[in-house]
Amino acid sequence: MYDYTKKYLKYKTKYLELKKIYNQLGGNFKKIKIPDWVLIENYRTMTDEKKKAAVDGDENSQYEWMVEEVNEFYEAVNNGDIEEIKDEAMGLIRTFQQFNNNRIKKLWKKVKKDITNVFDSREDFSDAFRKWHDKKIKKGQAKGVTEEQLIEISGLKLR
């Protein structure tokens, strides 16, 4: 005899997992559409030398780094991994904070709405920030960067 209860529980569990994921993002994840101008494959151009130049003030390298961060974010969206999407959103906000010139501001305006759709609450943002910041600190990066700084620079309205 076939055990329908076992099959029902398997599908019910999968349904609840998917519902949890959907609710985590407040249903906003599906609002994120990958723009035509974004590359989600073969887009990495930043070398250690270019990163150093960006940190030293070269605005072309800074812009190139921001473009790469945008591409990484949308690659994560394409992959559908919630934790990766949140991590890449944090990286994008940090890059915007670090290199806040006019070209970068224009690029930020193009993606800000999608970043807004990633975080559905202050608690959600705080959790993502802690995870992202812990990884960066272990690498010796993002020292002194605070959650409040990233919220302020991004202009996110979190409840």
Image: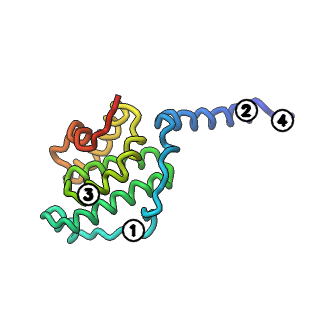
Sequence-wise, the earlier of marks 4 and 1 is 4
Identity of the residue drawn at 32% across and 51% down: 109
Q: Are marks 4 and 3 in contact (CB under 8 Å)?
A: no
Sequence-wise, the earlier of marks 2 and 4 is 4
Identity of the residue drawn at 28% across and 66% down: 64
Quarter of the picture holding the C terminus: top left
Look at label 2 and name its amino acid: Tyr
Measure how far apart labels 4 and 3 are at the Cα level: 60 Å
- Dot 1, crowdedness within 10 Å: few (<14), some or many (≥20)? some
Q: Which residue is mark 4?
A: 2
Sequence-wise, the earlier of marks 1 and 3 is 1
Q: Which residue is mark 3?
A: 104
Residue 107's place in the image compared with 3, above or below, is below
Q: Which residue is mark 1?
A: 43
Residue 138 visible in the picture = no
Sequence-wise, the earlier of marks 2 and 1 is 2
- Dot 4, crowdedness within 10 Å: few (<14), some or many (≥20)? few
Measure how far apart labels 1 and 3 are at the Cα level: 18 Å
